[in-house]
Image (cartoon, grey):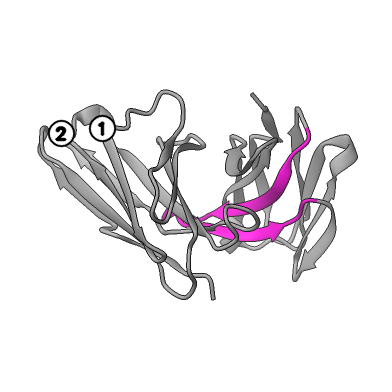
Amino acid sequence: GIQVEQSPPDLILQEGANSTLRCNFSDSVNNLQWFHQNPWGQLINLFYIPSGTKQNGRLSATTVATERYSLLYISSSQTTDSGVYFCAGSYGGSQGNLIFGKGTKLSVKP
Amino acid sequence: GAVVSQHPSWVICKSGTSVKIECRSLDFQATTMFWYRQFPKQSLMLMATSNEGSKATYEQGVEKDKFLINHASLTLSTLTVTSAHPEDSSFYICSATGDSGLGTQYFGPGTRLLVL
């Protein structure tokens, strides 16, 4: 099956720093999404980004579908950005069945 | 918009009992709902996909008689863990989409199950 690799697995930042999270896919994916899971377990949709670039405030994401990767940029990080960031995508005929990466655990220190 | 709720948010039960978890789309009609399971410090694993009015499709290795899924309406899906055992303790999360399974999935807040 498809493999979704996220890097880095853990990231510690000082408040105000910028960071880039990466997601690599072993095969072409559909419905690529980025999520933030807060400490209480809630998954929050960040981006639906099968291709191209999107920005939302301090966050932006870029997906290069032909090269099977996506990047999530966090600028001027805040302590509330802490949590686990997941990317996920579906593939082939399984349009809705999301395959998740193992996540990047982000800790932003004050 | 696109809010998904789950109830209960946490449950503790004795081994052998059955537990029902509800997933509701509050402000949209969910043609497709998904159920995931997440163990501590691990990623989400898809358990099954349910479409309103039809039987759920289970992922390989997921026992359909153990995890009963019913998608009775366009806003409600339920997951029943039958004869729960300690190894069923986990974080169960549902998601919903209104695009026949395509597009953005919106996730519920999850249900923490502890089986004693």
Quadrant of the image for the N terminus of chain A? top right
Left or right side of A90 for B48 = left
The residue sitting at 41% across, 49% down in the picture is: B93
Main SS of the magenta part reads strand
Q: Residue at x 63, y 53 (%)?
A: B102
Nearest the viewer among A64 and B52 is B52
Query: In the rendered structure, which amino acid carries the disc numbered 1?
Result: Lys
| Residue B83: mark in rendering | 2
- Is residue B71 visible from the viewing direction of this image? yes
The x and y percentages for residue B84 are 18, 34
Tag 1 near tag 2, CB within 8 Å: yes
Element type where label 1 sits in the image: loop
Q: Secondary structure at mark 2?
A: loop
Q: Is residue B62 magenta?
A: no
Identify the residue at image location x=41%, y=58%: B109
| Drawn side of residue A106 relative to residue B108, left or right | right
Q: Looking at the rendering, in which quadrant would you find the C terminus of chain A? A: bottom right
Residue count near mark 1 (Cα–Cα under 10 Å), binned few <14, some 14–19, many ≥20: some
* Residue A110 in view in this figure: no
**Chain where mark 1 sits:** B
Separation of disc 1 and disc 2 at Cα?
Answer: 7 Å
Q: How many numbered marks does the figure carry?
A: 2
Segment tinted magenta in the rendering: A28-50
**Which circle marks residue B66 in the picture?**
1
Tell me the amino acid under the disc marked 2.
Ser
Percent x, y of residue A91:
69, 37
In front here: A12 or A110? A12
* Labels 1 and 2 positioned on one and the same chain: yes
Q: Image point 78% across, 35% down: which residue?
A: A28
What is the chain identity of the residue bearing mark 2?
B
Q: Is residue A109 above or below residue A103?
A: below
